[in-house]
Amino acid sequence: MYLPFKLFKFIFCTLLLINSILCIDPSKRYFHNSVIINAKLLILGGATNTTDYEFGLFYLDLSKPFDNYNLTWTLIEDKGLPVYTWRSTSVLTLDNSTIYLIGGFMINKNTLEYDYSNLVYTYDYSTSKWSTPVLDGDKVLPRQDIKGVIDNSGIIYIFGGFNATNLTSFYGKIYNDMKTLNTVSDTWTTLSISGNLPLPCDEYTADILPNGTIVYIGGVEQVSYGANFTLVNMNKIKLFDTYKHEWSQMNATGDEISSRLYFSSVLTPDGYIIIFGGISYSSGAINIVGVSPKLAALDTNKNPFVWTTKSEIKLFDTYKHEWSQMNATGDEISSRLYFSSVLTPDGYIIIFGGISYSSGAINIVGVSPKLAALDTNKNPFVWTTKSEVGAPPSIYGHTANLYNDYMIITFGRELDTNNFASQVYFYNIKSDRWVTTFSPHDDKPKPTRPTPSATTTSSPEKQKSLAIGLGIGIGALLLISCIFIAIFIVHRIRRSSIIETPGNIR
C-alpha cells in the first residue's frame, strides 16, 4: 500500500496548496477602501496591524450565506495593488467595470518609500488588471482623507482633503476646492466656484442623491490657515449641485448627533443616509473616544433633512403605518450610549454595555446594569437585568457598504482598546439590529444610484473562479481514480504472486 499512500499524500498537499492560494486570512486594518462588484465585497489597501506592507486585493463572496466568525476571503491575484495605500478613496464606475483608486498615503511597491508620481490607479474588473491612466488637465496635488463620488455622466467629484507636505510629522494643508475627474476623457478639472464656498474640510462622508446633489457630512474643517482643526457640526450639511456647480448649506433638524470623523455612510434606495462609528476631535488633536450615537440616519426626503437615532425605543405599526412611544417599567436601566442590542426569538430585546454622556462631554465610565433585557411580550414593556454577553465594539477608520437590506461594516479600530477590530459586522436596516450572520436575498441588490442602460459583460474573474473550480474537481477525480487503479494493480500483483509461488501451495 506504499504507492497509494504516496498518491494520497500528493493529493492532500496539492489541495492544501490550492486552498492556501485561493483562500486567505487577511490582516486586520483601518483607513482602507471597499467596493461591491457582482456580489463581491472587495477590500483595497488600508493601514494594517502588521509591520509589513500588504498589496493583496481580496474579496468576500456575498452570494453565499455566512457569519462573521467563519469568513472565507479570496485572493484575486498575486500581484495585488500597484501601491500600498491608506486614507485614500475608491470610486466604482456606473457600469461596475472599473475601480478608480485615488490619493491617500502611497508607498512604492519596489522601494517601499513614499511615491506620489501617480495619484490615480484603475482596476479593470473584466481582466483583473491594474493600470496607470495618463491624465490631462489641471495639476492635482497629493490628497489624503478624501471621499469621491461619481455622477451619471461618469465624472468623479472630490472635495477638499488634506495634503501632508511633511511625511515625517504629517504636517500639511487642508483644502476647500472641488476637483473633478472625467473618466471618459481622463481629464482633471478644478471647478471655478466663487459663492458660498465651504471652509477647508476633510474626513467627511460624501453621498450623491439621485437628483445630482452631493451631501457632505461631518469631518473636520479649518477657519483660517494655521488655525486648529475643528469638528463640523453634524446639523450643518454641505450640499453641492453637480448640475449648477453651486454650494449651499442645509441646517438639519431632528435628534442630536455628536460631531465626528473617521466614520462611514451609506445611501439607501429610499433616501436615507445611514452613518456609523467615528471618533472625536478637539483642541487640534484626535481624541480616541466614542461618539453619540454610534448609528444614526439622515432622512433626505424631507426639507430640511432630519436626523434620527437608531438606539431609541420606538414603536411602529406595520399595518396602520403609525408611530408610538412606550414608557417601559421594571428594573432601573441607566441612560447610555455606544451599547448594542439584539432581538431574541422569544421577544426579548437584549442590550449590552455602553458609556455615559453628560454636559456635552463623553464620560468613559460604566453603566448599570451592563446587560439588560426588555420583555416585549408585556404591555407596557418590562426591563430586567441579565448576565453579561459580548457585543460589537465602537470602531473608527472602517468602511461601510450597502447590499440589499444590510449595511456591511469592514475592519476598523476599537475605541476602548485601540486594537484592530474584527473583520465584518452586519446591520440589518429593516429589522434595525446588528446580526452575526449574513443571508443574501434571491433578488438582485437594489441600486443606490441610477445605472446606465448599457449591459455589463460577464465577469472573467467569475469565469476564472469557475474554471479553477472545475479544474480542481477534475484533477481530484483523476488523482482519486489513479489511487484506485494503483490499489487494483497492487492487489492483482500480490494475488498473482500468491497463486504462482510453489512454496505457498499446501
Image (cartoon, rainbow, N blue to C red):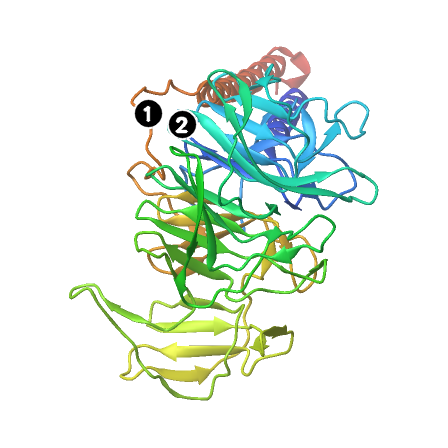
Return the residue at label 1.
Answer: 452
Residue at image point 36% right, 47% down: 268
Instruction: Estimate the spatial distance between the alpha carbons at disc 1 and disc 2, rounded to whole Å.
Output: 7 Å
Q: Which dot marks residue 94?
A: 2
| Residue 360 image-quadrant placement | bottom right
Q: Is residue 88 left or right of residue 106?
A: left
Query: What amino acid type should be assigned to the residue bearing mark 1?
Result: Pro
- Of residues 412 and 485, the one nearer the viewer is 412
Circle 1 packing at 10 Å, graded few (<14), some (14-19), many (20+), is: few
Q: Is residue 357 left or right of residue 383?
A: right
Is residue 417 at all visible to an observer of this figure? yes
At mark 1, the secondary structure is loop
- Of residues 109 and 69, the one nearer the viewer is 109
> Which residue sits furthest left?
320
Residues at circles 1 and 2 in contact by the CB criterion of under 8 Å: yes
Residue at image point 65% right, 18% down: 504
Image coordinates of residue 471 in percent, x first then y, are 50, 18
Please tell me whether residue 300 is drawn above or below residue 135 in the rendered image: below
> Which residue sits furthest top?
500
Residue at image point 51% right, 62% down: 294
At mark 2, the secondary structure is loop
Name the quadrant of the C terminus. Answer: top right
Please tell me whether residue 63 is drawn above or below residue 480 in the rendered image: below
Image coordinates of residue 249 in percent, x first then y, are 44, 51
Circle 2 packing at 10 Å, graded few (<14), some (14-19), many (20+), is: some
Query: What amino acid type should be assigned to the residue bearing mark 2?
Result: Leu
The number of numbered discs placed on residues in the rendered structure image is 2
Name the quadrant of the N terminus. Answer: top right
Is residue 19 at all visible to an observer of this figure? no
Image coordinates of residue 317 in percent, x first then y, are 21, 68
